[in-house]
Amino acid sequence: MTITYAWRGDFDNAAVNALHAEAFGHDQMPMDWHAQVHRHSLGWVCAREADRLVGFVNVAWDGGVHAFILDTMVTPDLRKTGVGTELVTTAAREARSAHCEWLHVDFDEHLRPFYFDACGFRRTDAGLIALR
């Protein structure tokens, strides 16, 4: 298995929509990922096994020193193989290259070992307001 990683890599919306549905366990939605990431993101990382999109992470930012990991997704058959960790490592490296000083992430409880142990995030206090 050879996986390649590309910062701001080419992708088509259908592939990301299919991966998102598979990774998060829901029906496919017709989201325009191209418009989303080009409008709001510092970048994104695509992971591919040959021509197959097997991982994706979006790196949003505030236009300054804060970047944000969003929508980390790996196809279920490649979870726990290092694909997700390399997606986040690549995102962190590129955010650092863009002079960001902080990389933020929020996640569900079951992902604590991934983000804290595998990716090296540290625990912080944070706040959240539910808007819906």
Image: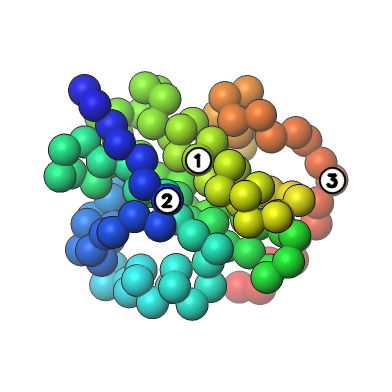
Q: CA distance from mark 3 to mark 2?
A: 30 Å
Q: Which mark is residue 90?
A: 1
Q: Callout 1: 10 Å neighbours few (<14), some, many (20+)?
A: some
| Residue 66 locus on image (x, y percent) | 72, 59
Q: Callout 2: 10 Å neighbours few (<14), some, many (20+)?
A: some
Hey, which quadrant is residue 84 in on the image?
Answer: top left
Q: CA distance from mark 3 to mark 1?
A: 25 Å
Q: Residue furthest left?
A: 51
At 45% across and 39% down in the image, what residue appears? 87
At 56% across and 48% down in the image, what residue appears? 94
**Mark 3 element type:** loop
**Along the polypeptide, which appears first: circle 3 or circle 1?**
1
Pointer 2 and pointer 1: residues touching (CB < 8 Å)? yes
Q: Is residue 84 above or below residue 125?
A: above
**Along the polypeptide, which appears first: circle 2 or circle 1?**
2
In this view of the protein, can residue 90 be seen by the observer? Answer: yes
- What colour-coding does the image apply? rainbow
Foreground: disc 3 or disc 1: 1
At 50% across and 40% down in the image, what residue appears? 90
Pointer 3 and pointer 1: residues touching (CB < 8 Å)? no
Give the residue type that dot 2 points to. Answer: Trp
Pointer 3 and pointer 2: residues touching (CB < 8 Å)? no
* Residue occupied by mark 2: 7
Q: CA distance from mark 2 to mark 1?
A: 7 Å
Hey, which quadrant is residue 130 in on the image?
Answer: bottom right
* Residue occupied by mark 3: 125
At 23% across and 63% down in the image, what residue appears? 12
Along the line of sight, the residue nearer the viewer: 102 or 131: 102
